[in-house]
Amino acid sequence: MQWESPAAFFAMGGYALYVWGSFGMAAVAMIVEPLLVGRRRRDILRRLRRERLAEELDEKP
Amino acid sequence: MSNRLINWFKYASPQSFYPLAGRMIPWFWGLAAIAFAVGLYIGFFVAPTDFQQGEGYRIIFIHVPASWMSMFIYCVMAFWAGLGLALNTRLSSMMAQALAPTGALMAFLSLWTGAFWGKPMWGTWWVWDARLTSELILFFLYLGFIALTSAIDEPRRADKAGAILALVGVFNVPIIYFSVQWWNTLHQGASVSLTRAPSMAMTMLLGMLVMAFAFWMYSIAVALMRVRAIILEREAHTDWVKQLPEVQGAR
């Protein structure tokens, strides 16, 4: 283990802004992207269910 | 032999690929999670401090995997788009469209982390250097592909136009890769190559490769999720989609 303290770890030898700016953006991007894809799936499924319901209602007299 | 061929074509239809992709996604997420945990541990706690760049070099553990993926995903996307154009297969064009946003994201991360690495080491966020400029062009090619395919209402025409753009853009990938050799760039040469020993500590290299694997698994997982959504959108009118339990079931 090369870090003397948690503070030294977060300071990244003076490169904190650059290291955490990079890892932070990657983390945000790779969390947001799957969430957006999940929303896209929910949207299309909601539409498909609505269409199915509409068809069922049409069939009833 | 013939059996194998038939199996391949079976999964080339959206109807049979949709459930297959659904079964594969958790496995790729699992592998991605494990590889991210191992890769970040190696990257932050095992890999030593760099003698020139101090702790700043640790950006490499995202920068290089993201850059590799941005180029690799583009090639895969162009392959599927080209296959869709040549064979008129619906699923391959859907695969290309599913890959584009993830590839754009990787190109963006490559540029972003590159800027955050360039600032402390070169003293500038950005230079119009061959490597950086060609990666920026790659990012714009992804955005162009996405914009073009979503601007055309008729899906098959959108596929064809997108495929041509994707195929024309492939020329840029070797330019990015070899830019550091062909031109005198600020960007350093490749740290890893197949022909010579890597110019970095073993644990740094290991961390980078594990992170690259993690990015790979992430990209496959998220692209499979997206292709499933695209399949539903584009096959919405078909009976098999209407019969799916997730469409039939209670909300």
Image (tube, rainbow, N blue to C red):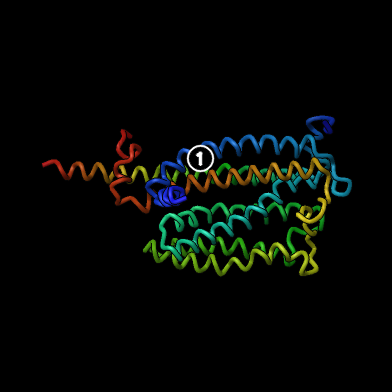
Residue B40 % position (x, y): 71, 38
Residue located beneath label 1 in the image: B25
Q: How many marks?
A: 1
The quarter of the picture where the C terminus of chain B appears is top left
Instruction: Give whichever of B129, B214 is nearer the camera.
Output: B214
Where on the picture, by quarter, is residue A61?
top left
Numbered disc 1: secondary structure: helix
In the rendered structure, the answer to whether residue B195 lies left or right of residue A37 reads right
Residue A53 % position (x, y): 24, 41
Identify the residue at image location x=65%, y=38%: B35
Instruction: Give whichever of B181, A57 is nearer the camera.
Output: B181
Instruction: Give whichever of B160, B187 is nearer the camera.
Output: B160
Identify the residue at image location x=56%, y=52%: B102
Where on the picture, by quarter, is residue B243?
top left
Amino acid, disc 1: Ile
Is residue B230 visible to the viewer in this orientation of the structure?
A: no
